[in-house]
Amino acid sequence: YEEVVGSSSLPVDQRLGLWKASDIFMVTPIREGLNMLPMEYIYARKEPHKPGVVIASEFSAVTSILNGALRVNPYDIQMSTSTIDKALSMSLQEREGRRYRDIDFVSTSPSDQWTRNVLRDLRDAIHEKSGQDSESASALSTPNSAKKGRSKQLIDTTAAFLAAEREASFTRLNHDVVKKAYDTTTNRVIILDFNGTIVLKEPPGKYLKREILGSSGYKPPASVIQALTTLCADKKNTIYVVSGDASETVEKALGHIGGLGLAASNGGHFLPPLVPGQAGRQWRSFDLGVDWDAVKRVALPVLSKYTARSNGSFVKLTHFSIGWSYYSCDPEWGSLQASHLVLELENELRAFDVRFVTLKGVVEIVPRKLNKGLIVKKVLRDVAAKNGGIDFILCMGDDISDEKMFTSVFSYIAEVGEDEDDIVPSPPVVRDGGVSNSSNSGDAQMEDVAAGLGNQHITGNAAELRDPCFSYTTAVGRKHSHASQYVNNAEDVAHLLVKLSGEEIPEGGVVETRRASQMEQFFT
């Protein structure tokens, strides 16, 4: 074993000999510009030589270029060791496939091409800035520009006034007021978002490039789970957790709370609360008029093509969504590929009633009618029909997709007392396996009615709001929202749930208790 510092100290003939003798090339810098050695390694092992495997740090520039390389985080020892094991045990077919992704690009991109591209980008940036400066100078010299400026200032001032008025009415939720209303009511509905609302989002590490989402292996704090268990045991409560994640993720985190309703895939796939005396429960779905299997057959080949050309991207499937994540890709390249992907998918899926949702680093295909408001309105309608009205509604969420939950609460309140013919019914519901509620057996229909989730129509007094009726739509984080009030973060949500359940808030708060529990698990 001999350690060599710096590539320049190793002659090219010795480097090539080393590349041909090595099965793996691993480069794990913490900070680095463009390193040509991984590309040199790939080129040295082109056909007819056996392909090698490149393992590259996600902090290096080369990981955004080589689509066939394996990505690692140098700070994650477990990830690094498992990736080395994967590379050593990789089949010849997969090695050849990874080499095929990169060999054409490496072979046609010599160092002089890189130099020309950098100089071209610098020149374009200088010309663009010069054009902006000249436009600004022209605007200043144009007659009446001062008047336009004053007019613009007036519009801005008016907008600022309206924004200030809106902010003044957007108040922070008072836990004591909610608790008092909760204690005086008898038919309550509580609907909560999952990730970022009852699951505390872990802040990304200082050196981590990719975001750590709360739903990726994390569960609500123990105090929140205990509070939900206590609240669900109260027959006066109907509680649902609504998530955009897959049903497996949500059920793994909260499925052990039998009295808690779960909704995954942005509400399109849901699991009603367990009815007393019932042995088990079954997932149900809204029938949104889309053949989802056919959508997958068309979309997945297209997504696979873009995944192969975008290192760090992957496909995520849930019951009612197909997502392509490019968050860990090179930002410029990922955004470019996402724009091309949407155009191609729009053409391929034009025969299906679907829409495309573009979020931070993700492109999602979902049924056009799907949103979280569907499950919210259905739960409210069915619980009101079962219990003769509702007198307490608490709806909380942190994401833009949760805005539909807030507006659905308002829509439900507005439709109460309306004629049945004027109300748009909820979509039909089918059990997993494609059996419609309308054709269920008698026992199954009784279970649906007992759970408050049959295909019921609400008329007359059954849909009336009780007097008084307390309704709280609450955004997690102060932001522009359809919600009427806000809380600062998910820890505030946890404290509210603990307070409603009658439990004591842990000393040091939910976050400190969670950290202590994680440390205890780590050392045991």
Image (spheres, helix red, strand yellow):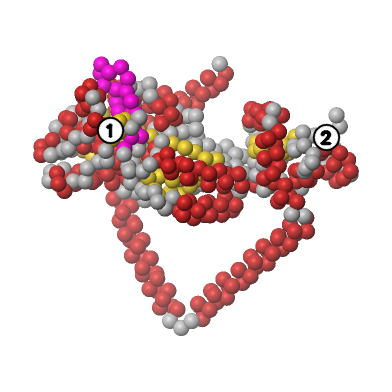
**Whole-percent x and y of residue 274?**
29, 22
Would residue 56 be visible to someone looking at this image? no
Residue at image x 21%, y 37%?
381
Residue at image x 69%, y 46%?
102
Residue at image x 33%, y 25%?
282
Mark 2 residue element: helix
In-image side of 384 versus 343 (left or right)? left
Residue at image x 50%, y 53%?
344
Mark 1 residue element: strand
**Whole-percent x and y of residue 189?**
25, 33
Q: Which residues are magenta?
A: 269-286
**Observer-nearest of 118 and 208:** 118
Q: Quadrant of the C terminus?
A: top right
Give amino acid for label 1.
Ser
The circle drawn on residue 394 is none
Which sits earlier in the primary sequence, circle 2 or circle 1? 2
Q: Magenta stretch: residue 146 in it?
A: no
**Observer-nearest of 177 and 236:** 236
- Residue at mark 2 to residue at mark 1: CA–CA distance: 62 Å
**Observer-nearest of 218 and 367:** 367
Say which residue label 2 marks: 21
Say which residue label 1 marks: 436
Q: Quadrant of the N terminus?
A: top right
Give amino acid for label 2.
Ala
**Whole-percent x and y of residue 173?**
31, 40
Q: Residues within 10 Å of mark 2 (few under 14, many from 20)?
A: few
Quadrant position of residue 270: top left
